[in-house]
Image: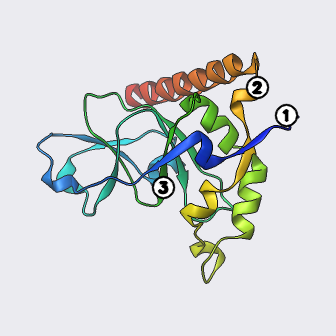
Amino acid sequence: SWEVRTSVEEISALRKEQVVPATLAEEAVAHYSLPAFDSGAMPEITEPGSIKSAKFAIRQPSVLLSKLNPSIPRVWNVYPDGEIPALASTEFLVLEPQNGVSAAELWAVLSQPGLFGNLAANATGTSKSHQRVRPAEVMTSMVVDPRGLGNARGQVRALADRVMQARNESRTLATLR
């Protein structure tokens, strides 16, 4: 119901820093991949040498938006813990919030169905299963301006925190089983 809109590029920055995991000295990395998203939206903790291609570095709270098959909305609110490197598949756009917007708020406005409908309509590719959105298309897309949400901003952040808690609880339960 909020009518104030802004472009994605006004409230986020597209980060493209690539890292070759095999060159890292750390024993483990948090790998944010499409399969990890699809199986519970928790990164896979793995040895860097097991990842065969370059990945995007995630340096701060960000939102990952899948470029692949926009008819399947994949928007991932991620908070790297800083203890191990966080790496994202190059099938994601790594969007860092900016201009007074939190990662939770960016996640909320990018999760709206209207955005994916527009992206799917403009996707390129030879078949539905191989469609991709162009980064420029995402960045110029118009979304609700979260800076105009007033008191709802706190509710959005609380909801995002609860989602993260639920994911962590789910991971703990799966480990215990």
* Mark closest to the chain's N terminus, 3 or 2: 3
Instruction: Find disc 2 in the rendering and name its residue.
Output: 149
Q: Which marked residue is nearer to the observer: mark 1 or mark 3? A: 1
Q: Residue at x 53, y 35 (%)?
A: 98
Q: Amino acid at mark 3?
A: Phe
Residue 176, image quadrant: top left
Q: Residue 141 sits in which quadrant?
A: bottom right
The secondary element bearing badge 2 is classed as loop
Which scheme is used to colour this image of the protein?
A: rainbow
Among numbered discs 1 and 2, the one appearing first in the sequence: 1
Residue 54 numbered mark, or none: none
Pointer 1 with pointer 2, Cβ within 8 A = yes
On screen, residue 96 versus residue 16, left or right, reads right
Give the residue type at disc 1.
Trp
Q: Which residue is mark 3?
A: 92
**Where 164 sits versus 19, above or below?**
above
Question: In the rendered image, which quarter contains the N terminus?
Answer: top right
In front here: 101 or 72?
A: 101
Secondary structure found at label 1: loop
Residue visible at 63% across and 47% down? 8
- Label 1 vs label 2: CA separation? 7 Å
Q: Secondary structure at mark 3?
A: strand
Sequence-wise, the earlier of marks 1 and 3 is: 1
- The residue singled out by tag 1 in the image is 2
Q: Position of residue 27 (x, y in %)?
A: 15, 40
- List x then y, in percent, for residue 110: 66, 44
Choose top left, top right, bottom left or bottom right for residue 159: top right
Image side of residue 15 versus residue 99, left or right: left
Please state, as top left, top right, bottom left or bottom right, where the C terminus lies in the image: top left
